[in-house]
Amino acid sequence: MQHAAEPSFRESVDLMFNRAARLMDLSPGLEQKIRVCNSTYTVRFGVRLRGKIETFTGYRSVHSEHMEPVKGGIRYALSVNQDEVEALAALMTYKCALVETPFGGSKGGLCIDPRQWDEHELEQITRRFAYELIKRDLIHPAQNVPAPDMGTGEREMAWIADQYARMNTTDINAKACVTGKPPHAGGIQGRVEATGRGVQFALREFFRHPEDVAKAGLAEGLEGKRVIVQGLGNVGYHAAKFLSEEDGCKIIAVIERDGAVLDPKGLDIEALRQWMTKNGGLLAGYPGARHVPDGAAVLEEPCDILIPAALEGVIHLGNAGRIKAPLIIEAANGPITFGADAILREKGCVIIPDMYANAGGVTVSYFEWVKNLSHIRFGRMQRRAEEARSRLLVEELERLSADQHLGWTLSPDFKQKFLTGSDELALVRSGLDDTMRTAYQAMREVWHNREGVEDLRVAAYIVSISRVAATYRSKGL
Ligand code: GLU
């Protein structure tokens, strides 16, 4: 648990902002304007369930409207509160600026334990919450576009999209009112995996810079790196799966709410996830790996890369000193408190900050929003034209080889890859990869070259704040 004496999540985000702002020459008025949260709407609504009226409390916070629509997920958890929603909305502002998605920052939350309700009840609750937000333009394709977050997913987004369409029957862009929808309801290929995929692309980019890898004291290359993942939800699962199956990382421990499983030889993530699905989300009893009930202690085990992919505040003043990982990538939002961040930096730990590390989700949300507004699937016009051009080249090469008796043969594997035009998934992954590389390079440029910048988090804030400030200035503020 977070130390009682530590600042709240929102204060922690503000303190991190201040570390960066100190190194910039913003006018005090502008600095304050960027830092503060513009508005938070609180709604309490009743839904008749199981014969009585249940009252729910929800929030939608808008941190910055320097660009519209504003963007950010909706979280379903009992722990949701105004401070948390505002902290997460602020992070969305900086995240969107860093990865150049043209949005302001927002976030929503509903105090609910989704496991306590069945599907039909959840639909009633979600539609009612959406109704309250839609009525006030807090869900709107041009003004405020939610997405999934903890406790929500494609199913909830489809209900929200349908609720908006029912209330705005003539809005041709209705589908763009929310992202993270299932592909059959206006979603995009690759959105579910996007945040985890983004974590993978972020690590690949980090490991392309030997100077940066050396700062963490690690040997070059992702191959064989020992990784600990906290949280095997959508983000942690995809990150762990891709890193182990495609980059040769060894996932030596997974931490969940009922403890952790460890295997120094590396866990089979797919098998573990299947086990959890069958066992009510619990790890205990998973064959072939050691289970320990104290999950938090496993954060302190030696490893090369630690991936907190669950909640905020899990690395705090109480445990930061014992964390051994030389590299931490924040797949969750705010997993390291302000105080813990200072302790880890002091020890030489390199932290790839949340606003960059988990930006894959909002990046692919941006692609989905663009797809909805353009009313056409990515690749639909180009794919076969691309294939036809590649075929021309292959046929010409084969003709030349035969005519000139050169004896060249193109390998079947090359031909198959070269002749396949890019479908939507391939385009989404390519756009995401490019985004993660470009954003990392903007951040590292500041990290290495700007006076007084010691870490990637401050560098990320500087890049983001400068972009938000430039937008405000161009508006004449
Ligand atoms: N909830 C996700 C986040 O924290 C996604 C937001 C979005 O796609 O708008 O970044």
Image (cartoon, rainbow, N blue to C red):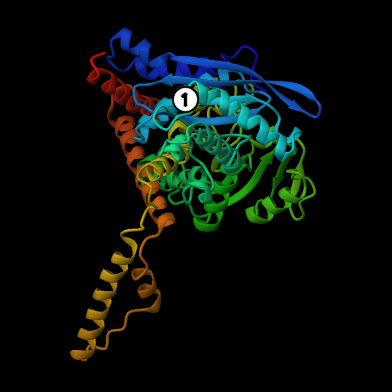
Counting the numbered discs, the total is: 1
- Return the residue nearer the eye: 104 or 209: 104
**Quarter assignment of residue 468:** top left
Q: Can residue 313 be seen by looking at this rendering?
A: no
Residue receiving disc 1: 106
The residue under the point 26% across, 88% down is 407
* Figure check: 439 above or below 474: below
- Return the residue nearer the eye: 330 or 59: 59
Q: From the viewer's perspective, tell me whether residue 403 is left or right of residue 379.
A: left
**Image x and y of residue 458, in percent:** 39, 25
Residue that lies at the very extreme toward the front in this rendered image: 170
Quadrant location of the N terminus in the rendered image: top right
**Image x and y of residue 201, in percent:** 43, 47
**Quarter assignment of residue 116:** top right
Quadrant location of the C terminus in the rendered image: top left
Q: Can residue 278 be seen by looking at this rendering?
A: yes
Amino acid type at circle 1 is: Ser
* Figure check: 386 above or below 96: below
Residue that lies at the very extreme toward the top in this rendered image: 29
The residue under the point 43% across, 44% down is 368
- Return the residue nearer the eye: 364 or 410: 364
The residue under the point 25% across, 19% down is 475
